[in-house]
Amino acid sequence: MARKTWMKTVCGWLWLVGLGLGACSSPSGPAADEAAETYARRREVSAPPTRRGRILDRHDSVLVDTRLSYLLAVPQRPGLDSATAVALNLLLGWPDSTLARRLAEARPYPGARSPGPIQLVLTPAEAEAVRSHQAEWPELALAEAVQRTYTVRTAAPVLGYQAANAQPFINQIIRYRRGRFYRLRNGGVETYYNGLLSGHRGYLHPLVDAGGQRHGSWAPDTAFQEGQDLHLALDAQLQAYAESLLGGRKGYLVALDPRTGEILCSVSAPTYAPAALTSPDQAGVRRQLLEDEDLPLLNRPAVLANPPGSVFKLVNAAIALQLGAIEPSTGFPCDQSLISCVHHHPAARSLTMGLQYSCNPYFYQTMRALIDHVPDSLVADTVAARHANLAAWQRYAQSFGLDTLLGVDLPREQAGFLPTPAYYDKARHTRNWRFRSIYSLSVGQGEINLTGLQMANMVAIIANRGWYYTPHFVRGVGTGGPLPRFLVKHHTLVDSANLEALVPGMLAVMQRGGTASASSLADVGIAIAGKTGTVQNDEGDDHATFVAFAPARNPKIAVAVYLENAGFGATAAAPCAALVIEKYLRGSIAPRRKRWERRMQYRGRSYELEHRLGRKRPPPAPVVPVPAPVAVPVAAPEGR
């Protein structure tokens, strides 16, 4: 009985609440009519952008633009006979063998015969010559197309390509070596900034009444954006010059402005022309690039991480100073029972002398003092002390932008690697490892891996005495500056005083008795602070490295060079860096270094003719008269 009464009470209350809600939801009068009116949702789309932005260098020279191209269709079935080919070469102003070579470069493989004609890209002058004699050549068809055009033959990994234009190349990568697809596919700034280069439509989302009047928006609006120009920090002339020096080599050279983080040039050798990946008449060249054992398609400064060698002694010394393992006046004997030192030199009685001679035993003992230091709190547990010291070393080294992505504005950047205590615990299968089993870290080898961009940024940090801006290629988008994240200053964990203590040793490297004294620019008034390195290679010749910045007291350029299988850093890498520094700061090369320049550039031309285009080796270089001998200090070879 009580249950029935309770149910009736609840039903009654629900009925009263329903009446109240009904009364509240049934207003009357003018306000009710206005509330009853509904608005239609509309989406208005503007016209698409009319242009894709250009890419310019730091001096506003156009590097990439969208321009009118001329395509000449040459029939394959039947092909041109020899007399017709000679006549066509004459018409276009080409040497006799040019047409055959161009047709071979356009075929995806030797002897390939596609169902349609082969398209060759012509210059405006060549197209005008064909157009004026069209009646005499009825088998030829001349067409026009608006295409992305490269005005230079340099900086291919930096400029990159628009994916829509490079589909034949991307398909070739997938078919040829699928496992290397992501390493070889590098779209450069064209891909990284594709949204800004392309622009976008505008979208409005108005609420409209029956009379067509607008009453706000039902979603956020998007403003129309035309394609923006990219202003690179790259110096096109310096880039071309650096590429000419590294021709015939495998490796990289990166130069940046330490004051801003702007990358002045970035060379990945062997080099190739940027148009080779998108031009319709370069299918054969793309196949050669894919099959080349030297892997020219790798963007080495960004994606290839290698042991840095002795240049990493700078970081080890800075960390040892910071943690109190050594002082600038600390000296160590050159005890070759610990580690080899391939050249003879006076005892390193200070850090400056240790850097000047690149004494391996000196930095072995420096790193040992850092790793084996046992504080009073861990005197009973030396294993924990070594773990704590290595963890501190890794943390301080990481603050130099190592073992992490720098955030450079290129796709597929790699992070490099620095070992941790946990890594060695797993690799050695025990926690009780000792310094002797990881001593290779003291000379920048073993498990340490750095990219070229990280090496250049590392020396830029020393040039700035402890801070850096993230390295970047684009210094301005449209009429504005770079992306906001490139304006954020980063600081290392090492004090500026300890980085300043490295500079005297780096200056001594370039002076008499130093490992790179032959590459000094003191004769033209430029003081270089540098460090050589030689990376031991068990599978061939050693790799040569060198890092430097100049001028030493007011740095304007920082350079990192890595040459694979080139031998000593003092004799192979340092001259390249010195020439690039002199070219950038002075605009010309002093006569005494012209022989270096000619020798390097000739090697590059020789490699290009023989290796890239399949031609015979050019005749020997002309003998240059040797001037009277000049007393020049001989560089001591760099120790491993």
Image: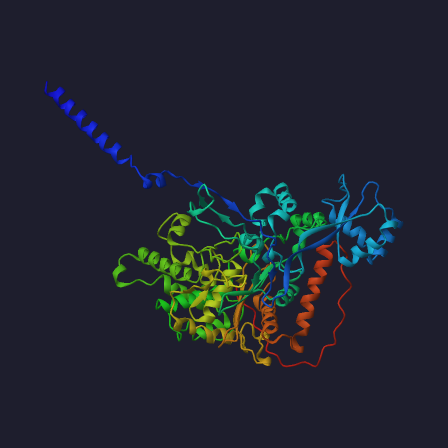
Judge from the rendering whether residue 218 lies leftward or rightward of residue 88; answer left or right.
left
259 or 429, nearer to the observer: 259
* Residue 358 image point, x, y percent: 50, 69
* Residue 628 image point, x, y percent: 70, 81
**Vertical comparison of 89 with 175: above or below:** below
**Vertical comparison of 170 with 259: above or below:** above
Residue 210 visible: yes
Q: Residue 519 falls in which quadrant of the image? A: bottom right
* Residue 536 image point, x, y percent: 54, 59
Judge from the rendering whether residue 172 lies leftward or rightward of residue 528; answer left or right.
right
List the single residue furthest toward the right. 83
List the single residue furthest toward the front. 29
**Vertical comparison of 309 with 114: above or below:** below
* Residue 256 image point, x, y percent: 53, 66
450 or 282, nearer to the observer: 282
Q: Residue 591 falls in which quadrant of the image? A: bottom right
Q: Which quadrant: the N terminus?
A: top left
Judge from the rendering whether residue 166 lies leftward or rightward of residue 487; answer left or right.
right
Q: Residue 247 falls in which quadrant of the image? A: bottom right
Q: How many marks?
A: 0
97 or 349, nearer to the observer: 97
List the single residue furthest toward the left. 2
Q: How is the image coloured?
A: rainbow
Residue 565 visible: no
